[in-house]
Image (spheres, grey):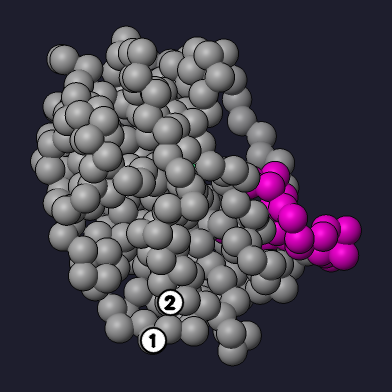
Amino acid sequence: MDTVSTIKVTKTETSRLSQVKLENLSFGKVFTDHMLVADYADGAWQSVEIIPYQKLSFEPSLAAIHYGQSIFEGIKAYLNVRGEAVIFRPYENFARFNESALRMQMPEVPEEIFIDGMKELINLDKEWIPTMENHSLYIRPFMFATDTFIGVRPSATYKFIILLSPTGPYYAKPSRIAVEEKYTRAAPGGVGRAKNAGNYAASLKPAEDARLRGYDQVLWTDAFEHKWLQEVGTMNVFFVLKDAVVTPSLEEGTILDGVTRRSAVTVLKEMGLNVEERRINIDELVDAYKKGDLIEAFGTGTAATIAPIKELAYKDEHLEFDLAKNQVSSELGKRLSDIRSGVAEDTHGWIVKI
Ligand code: COI
């Protein structure tokens, strides 16, 4: 395998940066000047290149399109208060990416490509990192099957790509969420824990149905009773009760082991709160809400960051939250943001400098 020292870099002749305003950006629309591309064939990673962002061309028989061997990650880079480019916990995403690869019968990507290649790419496009509040450089590593064959079998060839996208917040405003009672995101033994493209495709119809009813997203429930909470479309979920902060546990293997979720659990404990990762039944939340014991609800995700929830709807119940009382999520958001920006000390070794 080629190592990072042999990454071939072809720089763009004309940067697009001067045409882009790195302010008030929405999520996922703008891409930087360069991208990293690596190809897998004959049982090994063959080449790694950084090239100008460009179109790719494929035959219509491309395996990924037909059977969905396609996985991705989401990571963020920031400019800290000292003007240094830093990445938040990329090794966690690297490990999760390779777990997803194993579940989808795809090859693992080595650290020299995933981490070292990402650093080199960001270094090249460092000028694209936005500095406006709630903005960052979103990093999208992904891999897909490239055999040109329409029989069902694992592809023998793959492409791994990293894109960089300067971005603002994913959710511009607090969300209204409907508890899903009909469709299922994941069941034990399925692929719910993997970050594969198909999980998101499967969420689109339920999310659209929810949108038609006036909600922004769905909160997934278990496949059997539609009672046990899993995660929201693009984020993990937390509830602040009177005596504990609770979040669905990872045990069933049906939800994503979110890096922001993990960071939130650590920081909430540091805030002196009692955090429980456990099974959560929607009836328990409705009861707690009626007693005045359910105070806040929020989502966590790389793209979503810490996203306040303003309403949770379940059957005829509408759990509405007073956002002015969102003390836990706003303190959590501030602490995470201080770690990323270098205002607070990085006591956990979460920050990786480029
Ligand atoms: C992320 O938070 O990075 C995600 O991957 C969610 C994405 C589907 C927007």
Can residue 145 be seen by looking at this rendering? no
Disc 1, SS = loop
In the figure, 137 relative to 194: above or below? below
Which residue is at 67% across, 71% downward? 131
Out of 276 and 354, give the one closest to the viewer: 276
In the figure, 270 relative to 283: above or below? below
Indicate the amino acid at tag 1: Glu
First-in-chain label (2 vs 1): 2
Quadrant of the rendered image containing residue 7: bottom right
Q: Which residue is mark 2?
A: 339
Out of 273 and 179, give the one closest to the viewer: 273
290 lies left or right of 15? left
- Magenta part of the chain: 13-40
Count of picture labels: 2
Q: Is residue 36 magenta?
A: yes
Q: Where residue 312 appears, x then y in whole percent? A: 39, 29
Which residue is at 49% across, 84% downward? 343
36 lies left or right of 63? right
Q: Which residue is mark 1?
A: 345
Give the dominant element type of the magenta stretch: helix, strand or loop: loop
